[in-house]
Image (cartoon, rainbow, N blue to C red):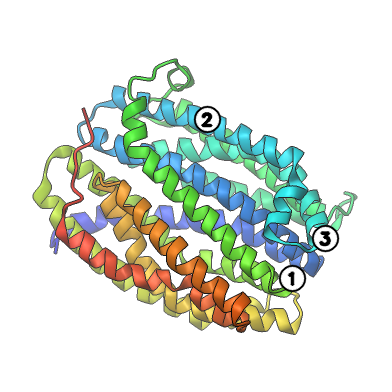
């Protein structure tokens, strides 16, 4: 265990802003869910379907950015800014391609994509209205994500909180105006929620660009550097970053498959899952922040070549994960009843959402330990392939088959099916304990 108080001050000075940023990011989805929930329950299901598509994009975007962080953090430990800028440029070009691919698919085939998640014609029709506007947010969303990740590489994390908080405030204001038709605006329903999100995404992108070009003094990034035809580190990026991207993509597909299983149990199960998932994200913000900061701290220290300190950090971080995991799980369990009362939903949907949140309260403890261990310590230390292999095995050989059998062969209650859908979050803890404490994941990725 690290006994130097300066480490804890340094670590939590980054964790807290990132956790707050995650709260604000997830609050955008929560605002859409709650405010559209007061409009119509069918609209909740439609937004839940659209959010699954957004989740796939989000996971791929994060995969590109996290792959960049893994490699760049080690160069940051060596203070090699030129190499970092080249790596960020590779990530930027990949984000541009990704955003336009998703825009093309969703703009031209929204109904076909929605039908993969749910067969309900009414839900599909409503989700199409939402997606036809939401697809215009993809480019700015991808760009903002990469720019804020670039700032995290150099340990500048507070700007992310400012950017996302601005987006949340604007999103809530325009949701109020456009969903319900206040202040003379048309009553747009789900299309109003999508338009509000589009406006907020444009604002957060503008703030991120201004900070990068005018305020940041560490990286001194310029767009001409990011879009320059420099592919020197392309293969380095692919070698370390591609497993991260594939891992996130496979995980997003698996999550989509899980939602598809619930979607075939009825619109109420789908709506309950959308509500429970959004509330769960609010309490899992510590998990995401711990993973992101751990990857930076471990990667930077590996880049510096101080492997003994890497081992000390790994031991200390695991204790932090366990403590915060228990607190997060208990917090979700204690407040789930109060949070569900803000939704205007049928009693059956309320009961399902309450059951789902009970399951998530327990699995969150495991999530907050194993996710930072594997995606923060192990991946940040240079072993980016292990998470890909581990997630693929658990998701496609255990979670999806067992939950499908529970739902369609035995016809068990949706809450029981949900237990099978989330069981890997506890089972992976045993893998994480062994993997982290063997220390075979320490690998130098820099040239």
Q: Mark on residue 210? A: 2
Disc with the residue nearer the chain's start (3 vs 1) = 3
The CA span between labels 2 and 3 is 43 Å
Please state if 208 lies on the left or on the right of 290 as rendered. Answer: right
**Quadrant in which the N terminus appears:** bottom left
Q: Residues within 10 Å of mark 3 (few under 14, many from 20)?
A: few
Query: 79 or 291: which is nearer to us?
Result: 291
Please state if 232 lies on the left or on the right of 440 as rendered. Answer: right
Which residue does the numbered mark 1 point to in the structure image?
A: 267
**Residue 91 x, y percent position in the rendering:** 44, 31
Please state if 378 lies on the left or on the right of 229 as rendered. Answer: left
**Residue 151 x, y percent position in the rendering:** 40, 37
Which residue does the numbered mark 3 point to in the structure image?
A: 121
Residue 79 visible at all: yes
Residue at the (53%, 73%) spot, across then down? 403
**Residue 192 x, y percent position in the rendering:** 79, 51
């Amino acid at each position: 265990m690290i006994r130097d108080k300066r480490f804890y001050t340094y670590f939590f000075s980054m964790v807290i802003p990132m956790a707050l940023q995650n709260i604000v990011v997830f609050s955008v989805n929560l605002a859409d869910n709650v405010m559209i929930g007061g409009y119509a329950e069918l609209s909740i299901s439609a937004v839940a379907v659209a959010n699954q598509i957004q989740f796939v994009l989000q996971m791929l975007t994060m995969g590109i950015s996290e792959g960049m962080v893994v490699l760049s953090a080690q160069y940051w430990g060596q203070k090699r800014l030129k190499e970092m800028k080249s790596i960020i440029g590779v990530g930027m070009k990949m984000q541009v391609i990704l955003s336009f691919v998703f825009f093309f698919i969703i703009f031209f085939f929204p109904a076909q994509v929605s039908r993969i998640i749910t067969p309900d014609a009414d839900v599909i029709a409503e989700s199409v209205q939402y997606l036809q506007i939401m697809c215009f947010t993809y480019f700015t969303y991808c760009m903002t994500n990469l720019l804020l990740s670039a700032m995290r590489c150099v340990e500048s994390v507070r700007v992310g909180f400012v950017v996302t908080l601005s987006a949340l405030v604007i999103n809530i204001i325009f949701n109020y105006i456009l969903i319900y038709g206040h202040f003379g605006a048309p009553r747009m329903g789900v299309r109003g929620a999508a338009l509000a999100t589009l406006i907020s995404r444009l604002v957060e992108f503008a703030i991120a660009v201004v900070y990068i070009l005018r305020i940041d003094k560490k990286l001194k990034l310029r767009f001409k550097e990011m879009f320059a035809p420099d592919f020197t580190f392309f293969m380095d990026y692919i070698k370390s970053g591609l497993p991260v991207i594939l891992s996130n993509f496979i995980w997003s597909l698996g999550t989509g498959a899980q939602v598809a299983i619930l979607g075939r149990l009825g619109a109420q199960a789908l709506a309950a899952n959308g509500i429970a998932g959004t509330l769960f994200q609010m309490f899992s913000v510590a998990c995401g922040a711990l993973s992101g900061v751990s990857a930076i701290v471990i990667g930077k220290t590996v880049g510096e070549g101080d492997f003994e300190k890497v081992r000390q950090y790994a031991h200390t971080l695991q204790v932090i994960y366990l403590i915060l995991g228990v607190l997060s799980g208990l917090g979700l369990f204690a407040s789930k009843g109060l949070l569900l009362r803000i939704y205007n939903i049928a009693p059956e949907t309320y009961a399902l959402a309450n059951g789902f949140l009970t399951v998530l309260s327990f699995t969150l403890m495991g999530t907050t330990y194993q996710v930072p261990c594997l995606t923060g310590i192990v991946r940040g230390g240079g072993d980016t392939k292990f998470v890909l292999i581990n997630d693929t095995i658990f998701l496609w050989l255990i979670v999806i088959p067992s939950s499908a059998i529970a739902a369609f062969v035995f016809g068990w209650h949706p809450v029981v099916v949900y237990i099978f859908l989330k069981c890997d979050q506890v089972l992976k803890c045993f893998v994480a304990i062994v993997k982290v404490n063997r220390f075979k994941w320490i690998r130098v990725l820099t040239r």
